[in-house]
Each structure stands twice: as C-alpha cells, then as structure tokens.
Amino acid sequence: MSDNVVTRIAPSPSGFLHVGTARTAIFNYLFARHNDGKLLFRMEDTDPERSKEEWKEAIINAMKWLKLDWDGEIIYQSQRIDIYKEYALKLQELGNAYYCYCTPDELEAKRKKALEAKEFVGYDRKCLHLSEERRQELDAKGVPKALRIKTPHEGLASFSDIVGGDLTRDYLEMDDWVIMRSDGRCTYNFCCVVDDHLMGITHVIRGNDHIINTFRQCTVYDRFGWDRPNFAHIPLILGKDRSKISKRHGAVSVMDYDTQGILPEAMFNFLSLLGWAPGDDREIMTRQELIDAFTLERVTGANPIFDPVKLEWMNAEYIRNMDDNEILDRVRWVMIDAGLTTRLSVEAHWHWMLQVVRLLKERVKTLRDFPTQARYFFTDEYEYDEKGERKHFSDSAVIALLIALRDEFSGLSDGFGEDEIEKALRSLAERLEMKPAKLIHPTRLALTGLTGGPGLFELMHVLGKEKCIARLDRAIEYLEEKFS
Ligand code: GLU
C-alpha cells in the first residue's frame, strides 16, 4: 500500500458515540496506522436540529478515551456551508446539475401517486426539460429552487468494494436527487463527497448501511470528474438475537462502558475483533499488534455479534495483566465514587491499596467489581452473609473456635505475615483434631462478612493484626448474644 493513505471518521453528533461508530473509527485508525497514513476527523454537524454541542463534546471525549488520536484539527461541516454551495454551483456550471422549481406539495402528490401505482418513486425530471425562457420567468417571480444532480438515466451504477466486491445498482432506480436545497444548504451525500475529495481521503471505511449512499456519492465524483476513493463497507454489529445492536441489548454508548468499569484498552481490543480477525487464534492483542495485523482484506463479510460476556472476559484479562499501580490509578476513582475512601486517603495509603488491588485483580471482571469485593477492607460496617451465617455460624460451638483463633492470632507478630497466620491456624486445627477448613470458613465470615474472596491468609495480612482481632471479637460478641 502506498504511504499516503488517508482515512476519516465522520460521526454525526446526534447522540453519544455509538459502539458501531466507535468500531468504524477503530478500523479507520488501524488501517491508517498500519499504512503509516492519516486518520482525519470530520464532525458531520450540518443538521442544526440534531447536532448538539454536548454530543460533539461527548463524541470527542469518547474518541480520546479510546485513544483514537486523529491527525490535524477536527473539521466541522457546519463551518463549511459556503464551500458546499460553491461546489454545488460549480456542478451546475459544468452542466451536471439543474434547478428544480417543483413545490414540496407537488412532489409529495407525485410521490403518493407513484407509490399507489407501484411505480418508480424518484423525481420525474420535470425541471430538467424546462426551457431557458420558462426558467427566467420562474426566477423573475422568485419561485424557490433547489439544485438537482444529473444522474445517468440508464445502465448500471457500480463500484468496487474492498469488503463486498463489485456492487451494482440499476440507474433506473436512482433519480436526480437534490444536492442543494432552496435555502442554499447542501444535502448530506453531496457535502460528504466534497469533503472527502477536498480532504484527500483515499479510503472510505464505514458501515454497510451506507452502501445506498455510496451509489449516490459515486455520481457526484463522476459528475465532477474526480477520482473516487476506495470503499470498504463493513458489516453491521448485531446483538445476540441477530438484530441490529440497540439499547435493547444493553449499553450502546461507548462511555457507558467506562461507567461500567470496562477498560478502554479492552474495549478497543474487543471492538477491533467485531468484523475483523487476525487470521490466527489470537484474541488478546495489544494496540501495536492490532495495527501490525490489520488489513481490510481480513474484514469478514458476516455480521459480527456483540457479546457482552466476551467483553467482560476480555476486560478481566486486561485487568489481570495490568500493572498494579496502573489499576490503582484508574480504580481509585471508582472506590472514591463508591464512598469507600477519599482522594487523600488513597494517596496516603497507596502501598496498602496496592495490596488490596493485587488480591482482587484476579477475581474481578470490571473496575466496578473492586468496590463490591473490597468493601470490607475499608469499613467495619458489614453484615454477615445470610447463607454463610446458616452454614458457619449456626452452632454455638463456633464461639469457642473463634476465641481460640483470636488467642492464637494475638500471639503473632505485629507484621502478621501470611505464613505465620497460616501456621498458627493449621497448628490450632491439628491440636483440636479438626480439618483447617472448619476454622477457615468461620474466620472468613467473621472478618469479611462473605463466604468467598481472596486467600484468607493473604487478606488477613492486608487487613492487619489489629483489625482481625477486633473483628473476631465482634463476631464472638455477636454469636454470644445470638446463642444466649
Ligand atoms: N455521519 C455518518 C454517520 O455517522 C458517517 C458518514 C460516513 O462515514 O460517510 O453514520
């Protein structure tokens, strides 16, 4: 591939960054970076009713979250209205566009009639045949006029798609569509081509719901005599029920996944594999590995399925393999948000927090799981799990066991090392002639309120001697009351 590849991402700010658009952005990014090319960013914000500032900002933030660094400044279509107009008039001067004076009512009536008769619904080209005299007359009256492109009237429209192969459509099914409305504003397909041409886009990579637009857009390239870019239309992402992914399937806004505790690295990796595969069995791939492996030829023709379970699995893998400091740096906000700690406290107890992270990183799927699973490290306010209580706190004999354990642990060093804790518990079990599990389960329930979690000796070390003793005392007191 030549080294002057230029791709673009062109979101419409009519909502937050959708996972489908994010996937398209990722493919454009990977293709550009693989070819040492450029990725440009164009905001398609010409529709004032649907484009909101907050959505533009949200889209930019989501692009940044995914580290989809684009080249150059963002191009805003809303600032280029005059350029589009200039090009529309140019096309008219070239004789490839003509004014249409038909009123909306007239057009609607014709459309209805055609629909009823099951005939071609497109524009009937009435104004193409107006005499110069008639045109001047209408202009003199100030009748509003739109500009329509001249589409070939016969033969096949075709383009070659890198993913879909040769695609064709009968020109008979296409009409002379409006490129500039009577208010001087140009329409979407026209602006898109003018921009792609002026921006020097070599590869248009987008969802295959745009194929219908591409046929129209090709007419614009042809009528200007411009080279067409390469097109690659990628299959749309489906939900597990094989319908187009929507809110029904869960979050569709990329940043909702941030809120859910998904790492951007995992999201990037996951979305890269929706409709593309490296050709071997790799799934966890770094950004650089993805860049190195990415080619459009490997984009699959079939619709990929968005599987949230797989995303969580991948996220868990990323968390497990991430540096502890890095995880803590990200998860601290989630912990603070959950009210477990404060910014200052995290800073003051960074080393201790790292130990908590280390204990839990193998067991969580998302960053959100950290506060849930780490609660007992930060607060004494927890209840005993109901099921656990029925299992391990149902016999008053457990009181004596907890007292023995408390006494055993009291004799240990302040460092409260994992090994010495383990040794103490096991030797007590031996002396009492019981299995260590008989002591381990009630101890865990007393210290954490839970029945599962990281290794007991490790978590006891992180909790520290003082807390462990105090919590055993609390459980003893609770049980004494319960059985009194
Ligand atoms: N603005 C269009 C969209 O958000 C994309 C247009 C394009 O990629 O050509 O779907």
Image: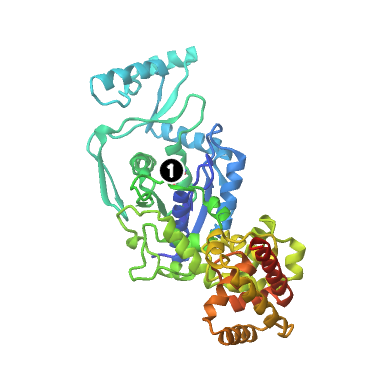
Q: Is residue 125 left or right of residue 186?
A: left
Residue in the image at 51% along x and 25% along y: 183
Q: Quadrant of residue 31?
A: bottom left
Depth check, front residue: 77 or 200: 77
Question: Which quarter shows the N terminus?
Answer: bottom left
Which of 198 and 93 lies nearest the eye of the viewer?
198
Q: Position of residue 161 (x, y in %)?
A: 31, 52
Residue lying at the far front in this picture: please name it: 484
- Residue shown at 40% from the left, 15% from the top: 105
Q: How many marks?
A: 1
Residue 204 locus on image (x, y percent): 41, 51
Question: Could you tell whether 231 is left or right of 40 in the image?
Answer: left
Ligand 1, image quadrant it occupies: top left
Residue 31, relative to residue 106: is it above or below?
Answer: below
For disc 1, the marked residue is 248
The front one of 346 and 275 is 346
Quadrant, the C terminus: bottom right
Q: Quadrant of residue 66?
A: bottom right
